Image: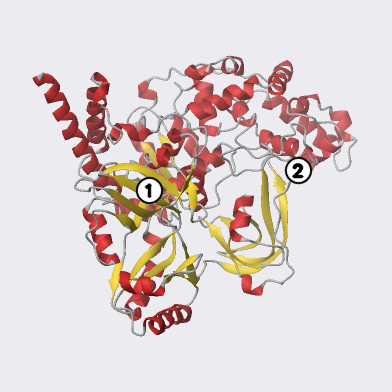
Amino acid sequence: MSGEREVASRIDELRREIRRHDHLYYVEADPEISDFEYDQLLAELQRLEASDPSLVTPDSPTQRVGGEPLEGLEQVEHAVPMLSLDNSYSKDELRAWYERAARELDHLPSGLVAELKIDGVSISLIWVDGRFERAVTRGDGRVGDDVTANARTIRALPLQLDGVSGLLEVRGEVYMPRRVFSELNAARREAGEPEFANPRNATAGSIRLLDPRLAASRRLGIWCYAVARGEDRRARRHSDDLRWLEELGLPVSPGWARCDDLDEVIARVDHWEEARIDLDFETDGVVVKLDDPVERAALGSTSRAVRWAVAYKFPPEGRTTRVLDIVVQVGRTGVLTPVAALEPVRIAGSTVSRATLHNFDEVDRLDVRVGDTVWVAKGGEVIPKVVGVVTSERDDDAPPFPTPTECPACGTAVVRIDGEVAVRCPNPVCPAVLGSRLRHFVARGAMDIDGLGEKLLDQLVTEGLVTDAASLWDLDSDRLAELPGWGRVSADNLVRELDQARRRPLERLLFGLGIPLVGERAARELARAFGSVESLAVADEEALVEVDGVGPKMAQSVRRWFADDGNRTLVERLRARGVDPRDTVDDQAADERPLEGTTVVITGTLSRPRPEVARRLEALGAKVTGSVSARTDLLLAGGEAGSKLDRARDLGIEIIDEADLDDRLRQKGVELWSR
């Protein structure tokens, strides 16, 4: 009996300790122990709970990983409606709100609170007697979705609040950290999936996923900003509520401040307009609230928004221009993507005439229409995107842009899978889908067939000479030479290039096949693990998930792809034409992978293209990621390195150049590049 008590006591001790470290890491950003030491604590707790499952409780840190997929999200009515905020876009509008409040109160407000406006998803959180019970999205303000299973996976959110009795309802904003968003989009880009438009879209999709395990992998964060109900509430003012929530260990929206008057608020606004660039989450303004609940009650609310608070919105970044048209592109997986055709405008050193709108949810959110004046910025200083609309300059008769019901290329009715924002053409022989798949198949990083650009591929498809990837090896130089714009030399060169492409490595073919979720890195690992398309095609999910970097979702995608009759026929047609590369199953010795376990980020201009450098580093055992974080071991910096270099210096991460890395590898008997 004493042994059982000792186990229970140790479990309680471990839970308290892990919760404390979660708070230090995810809320305070001031960890006391290493990731390894944390993992050891969690592993011990898992072992003890496994020894006596009756001791497992819903608020245990081991229960955050997410349970089984849900069949759907339950609709829940809010006991206290989650109303909206009116917006102000200038200091004059902010002053007008303040003066209107003073007139209605018949005196100046006794105090204000200025908080960062987090660009995420509003949520209601409920604890009962200190135990986390329910999380519900804002929805329409009166009814939202029950997302309790996904909210439990948010590490910053305490599942147990000590010293709280009765019911406590807290309002917060779920968000995706910028570094996580960058890594997520890099993975989606590599896998050929549509990227999320912004962290808010990614958050909205993640918190409503039906699979809590996938939600857990998105590493969402949360900031709490208000108490809606509290039987044990001791605070009188809103600022007192925020301090109380901090004392309870909840992650309270950072940078909030109580201000005596509007001048102090404007000083906070000016500060955050500059300082927000250093935050690891998106914020698009400052929320200004009356601090006194009596004054709040006197001002009341409309049916839509409270009158005792207002959101000051920061001016959008970028430049303004006009939307000439919105065109819909069809990708290789059938995803329809809206793109804005713009009056050319100079942004960050280049002329921009097109900007992605990402998906039709984003079109609706922005309410962008043909003819609108819009703000355009470069996401990550690279990809142009529309970030705002100047609605005051819109023509009165400008219609909203509709979500397509049919594919613009083939007329097939589009489909939308539950839980996804993407609208897809399901027609496997859609000419736009075929063209996009072929462009991917011949591209650098895939089969790398030089001389087959978009126009030439479209010509071959139109002429009926190419119907799928395998048919490329049926091309005849005599027939090609007869086509407009070709000639004997061009035809012979292409046929020769196709013959050489038969000998491309297996990883190139696997990536070129366009298996959903399988990017270059995953294709490389699958090639090493299975050695041939034939072996991969018959691998079950259990064998697939044993491969480094392959999770259950990717394994399911691979199985579905090879289960499709059309895809199996394509593989057979490629094999019949001699496109069947074989790799030796990877048994590379440890001394040939000296960077095993090292996380590397690449920045700046190097002697070779970054994808080639990344592939070489991965072959040497490294894990190459796109953004610098506390988990980065090494920054490989070339010429003209940018913000990643500054970030690495701030975090104390080791920084080396190519020559340093080559010297280090040669000491271990390996060269970065063969001489």
- Residue at the farthest left position: 2
Asked if 612 appears above or below 559 in the picture, the reply is below
Asked if 597 appears above or below 343 in the picture, the reply is above
* Image quarter in which the N terminus is found: top left
Residue drawn at x 39%, y 37% as measured from the top left: 662
At mark 2, the secondary structure is loop
Q: Is residue 282 visible?
A: yes
The chosen color scheme is: secondary structure
Q: Is residue 157 visible?
A: no
User: Closer to the camera, 35 or 463?
Assistant: 35
- Residue at the farthest right position: 482
Q: Which percent across, then down, holds residue 478? A: 88, 29
Q: Which percent across, then down, holds residue 527? A: 54, 22
- Relative to 2, 288 lies left or right: right
Total marks in image: 2
Residue under label 2, please give it.
407
User: Closer to the camera, 272 or 639?
Assistant: 272
Q: Residues within 10 Å of mark 2 (few under 14, many from 20)?
A: many
- Relative to 64, 189 lies left or right: right
- Cα distance between the residues tagged 2 and 1: 37 Å
- Kindly identify the amino acid type of the residue bearing the numbered disc 1: Gly
- Tag on residue 221? 1
Specify the quadrant of the image occupied by residue 518: top right
User: Closer to the camera, 369 or 480?
Assistant: 369
Q: Which percent across, then down, holds residue 438? A: 72, 35
Asked if 638 appears above or below 16 in the picture, the reply is below
At mark 1, the secondary structure is strand
Q: Are marks 2 and 1 in contact (CB under 8 Å)?
A: no
Q: Residues within 10 Å of mark 1 (few under 14, many from 20)?
A: many
- Kindly identify the amino acid type of the residue bearing the numbered disc 2: Cys
Q: Which percent across, then down, holds residue 234? A: 21, 59
Specify the quadrant of the image occupied by residue 377: bottom right
